[in-house]
Amino acid sequence: MGGRTCKFWMVIGCALALAPARSSAEEGFDTEHIFGFMIGTDVGNVGEREFQTQTTGRVGKGGAAYRALEHEVEIEIVPLPNFRIELGGTASLHDITGVPDIDDRRQFNFQGASLDLRYRLLDRRRAPFGLTIAAELHGDRIDETSGAKGRMYGTEFTLAFDRELIPNFAIGALNLIYQPEWARFEVGGVSEKSSTIGAAFAGLVRVRPNVLLGGELRYFRQYEGIGLGEFAGQALFVGPTAYFQLSERSRLTLSWSMQAWGRPAGSGGNLDLVNYERHQARMVFGINF
């Protein structure tokens, strides 16, 4: 854990040193992209178009060799006030050996496509806090955890809140999450349904006009069935996040999370490596066009 933490902060330090300084910061925050694993309530201005790449790595499962990498390419548009649409496609890489209940495999495949819709209900500049509702729908041909082929469908509903704690210096955010998922695997025709609920908290401070540093804390509970049926496991993730405004049009977000605590159903221990990974990392690069 110490080595990974050290490497993460070395990357942050290099980015801080190379990031261009600006004479003055913009008023307030634009929270649309500053968080790593969470979302903010800002959705952009009418007519905005953005290209974004998002790379997510997940490592460590069941005490064996488990590595999964997802690379998503996305196009974002804002056709109406307070309403944003995002279309994406994802490719995935799996390298799995010796994980209980998961077949060994080493493969690279096109995973699937997604549609993300967000509508801002409250603008924190005119209300006590910002409030946005989001729904991300995805259809996949590869299971993101096991890499097995099949048909997977899911939706992630998020209720996002954020508020400036100290004007133009510190921002806090809360996400409430519900994720129902359906899967039918190609081998054996096995069908599965699951659902996850979660809450995530984040705080960031402006350390330079174009640099934000902070952290995210996320808690999840997974159940069998889409209606929160039988309890399957729970996990708490915590880790740092850094946001860099590289230029007027480009940006970079880096985030890393470690499972600090967890427990699968019917088992002891301090981690849930059945339903979740030990480490998760994400890098997001975006550019306006």
Image (cartoon, grey):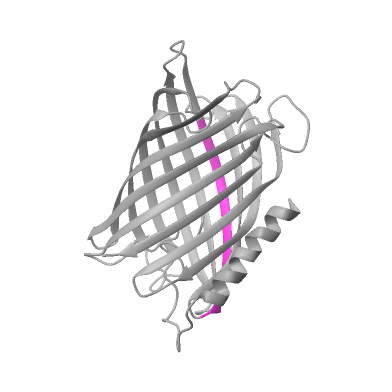
Q: Is residue 168 shown left or right of residue 274?
A: left
Relative horizontal placement of residue 242, taking residue 235 as reference (left or right): left
Residue 251 is left or right of residue 198, and the answer is left
| Residue 178 included in the magenta stretch of the image | no
Residue 85: horizontal and vertical position, in percent? Answer: 28, 52
Classified by dominant secondary structure, the portion drawn in magenta counts as strand
Q: Residue furthest right?
A: 269
Would you say residue 34 is visible in this rendering? no
Question: Front-most of 280 and 92?
Answer: 92
Q: Is residue 217 left or right of residue 29?
A: right
Q: Residue at x 38, y 31 (%)?
A: 140
Q: Is residue 271 above or below residue 167?
A: above
For the residue pair 94 and 278, the one nearer the viewer reads as 94
Could you say where residue 219 lies in the image, as x and y percent from the top left? 61, 46
The quadrant where residue 259 appears: top right
In what quadrant of the picture does the C terminus appear? Answer: bottom left
Q: Report the residue at 38% width, 73% height from top.
A: 126
Q: Please identify the residue farthest to the bottom as the structure is shown.
A: 23
Q: Position of residue 185 (x, y in %)?
A: 44, 18
- Observer-nearest residue: 124 or 180? 180
State the residue at coordinates (78%, 33%). 269
Which residue is rendered at x = 53% and y = 36% of the image? 196
Q: Nearer the viewer, residue 173 or 19?
A: 19
Above or below for 93 versus 265: below
Q: Say if residue 113 shows up in the picture.
A: yes
Q: Magenta span covers which residues?
A: 195-208
* Relative image position of residue 3 (x, y in whole percent): 72, 54
Number of numbered discs present?
A: 0
